[in-house]
Each structure stands twice: as C-alpha cells, then as structure tokens.
Amino acid sequence: MRAVIYNLFLHTLVAPLLAAYYLPQVIFRGKYRRSWRGKFGRLPQDLTPDLLPRPRVWLHAVSVGEVVALSPLLNALKKLLPTASFVISTGTETGQDKARDLMIGVDGFLYLPLDFPAFVNPVVDRISPDLFVMIETELWPNLIRSLKRRGAAIALANGRISDRSFPRYRKLRGFFAPTLQSIDLFLMSSELDASRIEQLNVPAARIRVTGNTKFDAALEETPREAEERMRELLGIEPGTRTLVAGSTHPGEYETVLAAYEELTKNFPDLVLILVPRHVEKTPLILSFMEERGMKAPFLRSAADRGEKRDGRNVVIVDRTGELFQVFSLATVVFMGGSLVPRGGQNILEPAAWGKVVLFGPSMEDFRDARDTLVLTGSGIEVRGMEDLARQVSELLNHPEKNVELGRRGRDELLNHRGSARKTAQLLAELIPARTRIMCPSAGSLTK
C-alpha cells in the first residue's frame, strides 16, 4: 500500500513539477543536457553491463562531496575484490565529472535514474548488481525495492542523519520502514548516527560504526605540483598572506568581503581568494563589490586566457573542481555554507593541507569533522563579520601559532585514517556466496 501511495504521489505531483523545472532548463539554458537521458533510465553507450564479470558492484554517490568520499572506498574494495566489476552512478553532472577524474579502472559510469519504476527497473535489470552501495543517506524506495527484487545485497556507507533531517525521518519512519528493512547493512559515520538510524527501527545487528571515509579522502593526496600550478595560475608568491573563502553561498559573500576590507586596514597586502559554491553566482559577487566601490577582482577564468593578476588582491575562482588545490595557497581558510543555514561544507580538505579552518555555526552536516578540528584548535567557529575579521587577524599576527594549530589538525586527521578499509571489509562480506567464489581474496581478507 505504501508503494502505491508513493508512486501515485510521484506521478500526480512530482512528475509535473519535474517537467516544469527541467524542460525549460534543458531547452533554453542548456543545463542537464548530459544527464537528462540517464535520469530517464538510459544507460550510456559505453556501458554494456551484460559483458561485465561477476561479482558486479554498483556504487552511488550523489555529487562531488560524496564522490570524493567514495574514492578511497573504491580503492579499498578493488584490493579486496580484484576480479569484480565496478560501476559508478552520480546524481549530478559535476559529480560525474569528478568521478571520471578521480576513479581509474572503473567499468562504467551512469546517472542515477529518477525514482520512477519505469526508469529504475530497466537499469537495475541491465546492471543486475550483486552489491549496491550508496554513500551517505539517500533513500529511494523504488530503486531499493527493485534492487531487492533482483537479489542484490544493499548497503549504506558513510551513513549520516543530520540534525535537520532526523526529525523528518522520525516522523516518516512508518513510510520508510519497508525501504530500511530492505537494506542489509548500515555503516554509520558516528555513534550518534548509529543511534539515530536505530531509532528508525533498524535492527542493531545491521548497524556498524565505521567512521567517515572523508578522513581518508582528504589525506589521499595533497600534491605539491597542485600547489605550484595554482600559484602560477593565480600569481600568488610563496609567503603571500592569503585568506581563502571556500564554498561560499549567497549571504556569505557580503560578510567575507566586508571582513576582508576590515582586515586590509592592518594587512594591506592580504590576498582574498573567494570560491563561490556555485560559479554561476559570480555576477552577484561582482555586483556587490561594485556597490561597495571595491576594485574589480581577478577572475580565475582569465588565467586560462593568459591574463595576469597584476596586483589585484581579490581573486574569484569561477571554475569548478579546483577548490582542493586552492586550499594549498591559504594562510587561513574560511569555509562557507556555515554562516547561512546550509549545514556547512567539508572542512577536512583544508585541514589536510595543514590549514586552520574558520566556519560559522551551521555545521550540522559535518559535525564529526567540526568536533574533531575544534578539539585540536585547528577549527574555529565564528559568528559574523567582526568575529571573522578578529579571528583571521589573530592568526595572521601569530604565524607560528597558526602553523602549529594547522599541523595539529592534520595530525588528528591522520589518526582517523582507516575508515575506507574497515568499510570495504564489511561490504565485501555482503557479496552473495554464489559470486564470492570468483573473488577468493574477499573471504581471506575480511576474516
């Protein structure tokens, strides 16, 4: 009965809204042109699941952050299951681009179909996975029902239930009960997440706490060549005091720029590198700077045309996929999505470079990372423009303290390594016995 009501809701209410949103975006703005066919259940031409050997493992990561977390887990699984085939799905085009860039030796990539039976069932039937793993908490009832019908083992990895979403899940736990009952293993990021999923009537025997693979992902590579490339592109000399404001949202651009103007009174050579969460918001930042009478910034895209920064001390990175490399240039980092109620962004990436990270009070989606860095002093909460300017000023005035705190944060990340390996071992044990024979190493390495 729940399935009938859910699908009736999808077809009568959700479908018209999706059509009203997506069609103009595809036709008039050119967005989603690479992904819309996949959303409607079309597999890419270069993916032929029928030819893939077993066991087949399907891993899903919705967007860039989840893809980054998936990368070390995929590497660990490939070591445990050397003869398995792996396909990766994403929900966004930026996530797909990141996956194709990060993940070597994968058998295919696809976009996750919208959760309508007509789109989901043919894809599940074609791929016919032995194991399906979703990164973080994405519950699609029709997808999970179809996978279970096909006999796939299903797992949730890096499981999180945020402070914001937990009340909603708890109210709807009756509706989600069949979906949760179909999931064989819940690998949760923390004890709190484990407690919350258990409160949704998941049996404790199906729950394990394995930590967050984002700790592993952040430490996978901090290549010096990436730092050198960014220095050359943006014209940032070693030793230049630089404030990087990463993944900033509307409502934060103004705060960061106002704090920067205040800081330049005492640090006139301070460089600000502002990285908007969505590059299409760059015109808003330019408009705000013009209203304040600020000098025009240097755009990262101009570097591709051979332009130089030429003394412009505000840089806007209007390119996607480069934030991790930009962190390497920072003296201090402010991480956005936190001064506005967005739940925060991944503060582990700058910490992996040994940087002190400032963030606002809205860090619900990254509370484990926040708590880890706050305990070492390498994560500092700020409440607004004046607090941001004061904390940055303190760190700039005490460079030795700044370096030491950043080192402590990176050392603490190193202490948290191993989540990907533990998660992979438990996932390998889910491979059905009929296909485990084809991967003899899985049994021996998971004992």
Image (tube, rainbow, N blue to C red):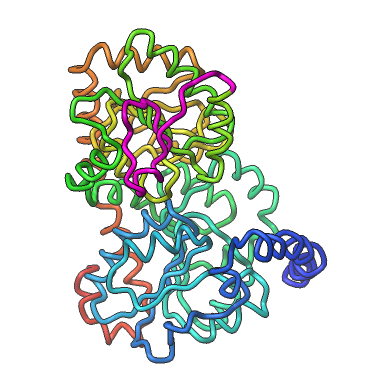
Q: Position of residue 249 (x, y in %)?
A: 54, 36
In the picture as drawn, the residue positioned furthest to the right comes out as 12
Q: Position of residue 75 (x, y in %)?
A: 26, 64
Q: Is residue 66 left or right of residue 197?
A: left
Q: Position of residue 315 (x, y in %)?
A: 39, 33
What segment is highlighted magenta in the picture? 291-316
Q: Is residue 332 left or right of residue 7?
A: left
Which image quarter holds the C terminus? bottom left
Q: Position of residue 109 (x, y in %)?
A: 43, 73
| Residue 46 to residue 183: above or below | below
Whether residue 390 is visible to the viewer of this picture, yes or no, is yes
Depth check, front residue: 246 or 53? 246
| Residue 237 to residue 8: above or below | above
Whether residue 375 is visible to the viewer of this picture, yes or no, is no
| Residue 6 to residue 246: above or below | below
> Residue 442 sits in which quadrant?
bottom left
Judge whether residue 312 is colored magenta.
yes
Q: Residue sitting at 67 percent across and 73 percent down?
A: 116
Depth check, front residue: 317 or 248? 317
Q: Residue sitting at 47 percent across and 55 percent down?
A: 136
Judge whether residue 284 is colored magenta.
no
In the picture as drawn, the residue positioned furthest to the top comes out as 266
